[in-house]
Amino acid sequence: MLLEERFSRILHLLKQKGTVSVTELSSLLHTSESTIRRDIAALSRQGKLKKVYGGAKAVDSTILTSEFDVQTKSAMNVEEKTKIAQYAATTIQNDDFVYIDAGTTTLLMLDYIDAPNAVFVTNGIPHAKKLIQKGYQAYVTGGQIKLATEAIVGAESVQSIQKYNFTKCFMGTNGIDIKRGFTTPNIDEALIKGEAVRRSYMAYVLADHTKFRQVSSVTFASLSDACIITDQLNFKEFEEYTVIKAVNTDHQ
């Protein structure tokens, strides 16, 4: 991996998590810990992060304009995402007509759904495959395929769900902010996310604790538009704006 790409991924991860260890970066970037330490030192000299014992800390947060690909995100916060996915799956009933957003946490959720008669619509390519393999009735949206997130997006995707009225939708997000709501760095993905939320009786956003107080380029819904299912809630002020379920009770 080129130096510039490592720098970009380190800074992006810090914007999402706030702090990160040398060991974690080494594993995610498939790079030696000695190289990661040199990268952190170089970025610290540039004023782009704060060097701390065993890792790095983010400087003042900024707006996120890009995101990792599916493979990279699948390896991040797996335990937290799994707990969120397990709980979210229990909210689906047999008579539900459900929209499932593309994303790594929503994909994990499919392993735990037990509602044989529920019907699903998704813009996630691996999501559709897994639903069919599990024997569910599932439909995919039309539109353009975005390889990085394995999602179907664009105007056609939005139009293809405008005739539907979902009982529930389950969404991913890149950021959760009190003023700017739920955000994503991609305009096309924001359009389909926003339409799915508007067409759902109940909307749920699945997000681990690192997504709070983060902002990406495009808002797709306000906080009051959806309930949040997370692993732990470190910022209690968010409870004033929507319903939040923190599934990791050890941290409540």
Image: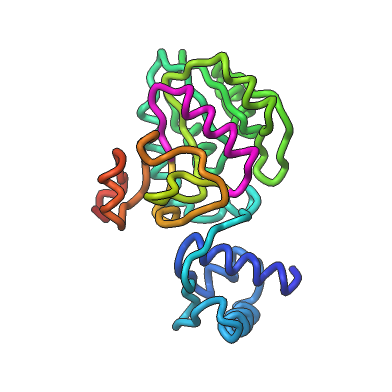
Picture coordinates of residue 47, whole percent (x, y): 56, 81
Q: Residue furthest front?
A: 179
Is 183 positioned to the left or the right of 251 in the image? right
Check the image and tell me how it is coloured: rainbow
Is 66 positioned to the left or the right of 204 in the image? right
Is 188 positioned to the left or the right of 23 in the image? right
Task: Name the residue nearer the viewer: 23 or 123.
Answer: 123
Count numbered badges in the picture: 0
Picture coordinates of residue 195, whole percent (x, y): 54, 28
Q: Residue furthest right?
A: 2
- The reply to whether the magenta stretch includes residue 180 is no
Q: Residue at x 52, y 56 (%)?
A: 76
Picture coordinates of residue 146, whole percent (x, y): 71, 40
Q: Residue at x 56, y 46 (%)?
A: 218
Task: Name the residue nearer the viewer: 126 or 175.
Answer: 175
Is 227 positioned to the left or the right of 105 in the image? left
Task: Name the residue nearer the viewer: 227 or 150.
Answer: 227
Specify the quadrant that holds the N terminus.
bottom right
Q: Is residue 239 above or below residue 151?
A: below
- The reply to whether the magenta stretch includes residue 187 is yes
Q: Is residue 41 above or below residue 10?
A: below
Q: Quadrant of residue 200?
A: top left
Picture coordinates of residue 3, whole percent (x, y): 72, 74
Q: Is residue 187 above or below residue 29?
A: above
Q: Is residue 202 above or below residue 228?
A: above
In the image, which residues are magenta? 185-205
Q: Residue at x 40, y 50 (%)?
A: 179
Q: Residue at x 65, y 51 (%)?
A: 69
Q: Quadrant of residue 53?
A: bottom left
